[in-house]
Image: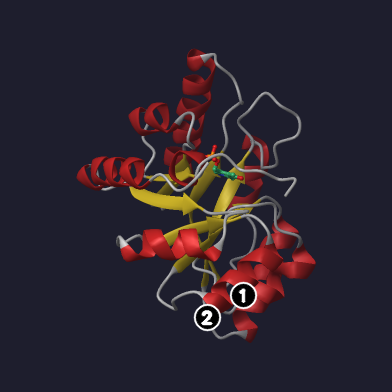
Amino acid sequence: MALQIEAYKKIKSGLDETHTTLIAVSKTKPAEDIQALYELGQRDFGENYVQELVEKEGALPKDIRWHFIGHLQSNKVKYIASFVHLIHGVDSFSLLKEINKQGLKNNRVIDCLLQVHIAKEETKFGFNESELNELKSLPELKNVHIAGMMGMASFSDDKDLVRNEFKYLKTLFDAFGNLTILSMGMSGDYTIALEEGSNMVRIGSLLFGERNYNK
Ligand SMILES: *Cc1c(COP(=O)(O)O)cnc(C)c1O
């Protein structure tokens, strides 16, 4: 499926009205598709794979804000540390320390979101509630800024389940203190996420069409 220009315009204008940031999730999609949305004014794009992100960053306009939304391995932080706008998937203190180290090397403060495990599925990464509490008492890292939280709800048709998971994340977000960004909601569940207090959504397939991983 190809780029969905009309869907993009509709979603974007709806989100603008509520001051919600739209991250266009472009993983596996070609640079031309990103360029096409860029020309319509889109600046925030999300990628899941380090190598793919590095290649696209090199090929596309410099004022794109690149969001890393995948699972980030510590040994790969160095490849994106000079330019990444926001890292959504910080799920361990050791990763946070590595981002801090690379931030220092690049003489910048890197914005990060704490990924919180809210879904029923075992496979989704993230901190749990007690780990978040431990984080608060750990020494401050000068080259990272914890700007907010990110979570992924269960992949389920049960809307009440999804809603309750988002509600739970919002509660943790409010309790943590000093956070501004709540990244929750994807193509299938972003309207529920918005109702539950999200201010940043990560949407891929509704904008770029379905992904095909076996090309
Ligand atoms: C792929 C991905 C998305 C976008 O998913 P869609 O269902 O295509 O909108 C959002 N967030 C994360 C973390 C992803 O990996």
Q: Callout 1: helix, strand or loop?
A: loop
Query: Which residue is drawn at the image coordinates 34% and 28% (left, top)?
Result: 195
Residue 18: image quadrant is top left
Q: Picture coordinates of residue 80 (x, y %)?
A: 63, 72
Q: Mark number for residue 13?
A: none
Query: Which residue is drawn at the image coordinates 62% and 52% (left, top)?
Result: 89
Labels 1, 2: front one: 1
Q: Picture coordinates of residue 21 (x, y %)?
A: 35, 51
73 in relation to 108, above or below = above
In the image, 163: left or right of 143? left
Q: Which residue, as the protein is rendered here, is positioned at the far left?
A: 17
Does label 1 or label 2 sit earlier along the sequence?
A: 1
In the image, 110: left or right of 213? left
Crowd band around label 2 with a 10 angstrom C-alpha radius: few (<14), some (14–19), many (20+): some
The residue where tag 2 is placed is 108
92 in relation to 52, above or below = above
Whether residue 8 can be seen here: yes
The residue where tag 1 is placed is 81
Query: Which amino acid type is shown beneath numbered disc 2?
Result: Arg
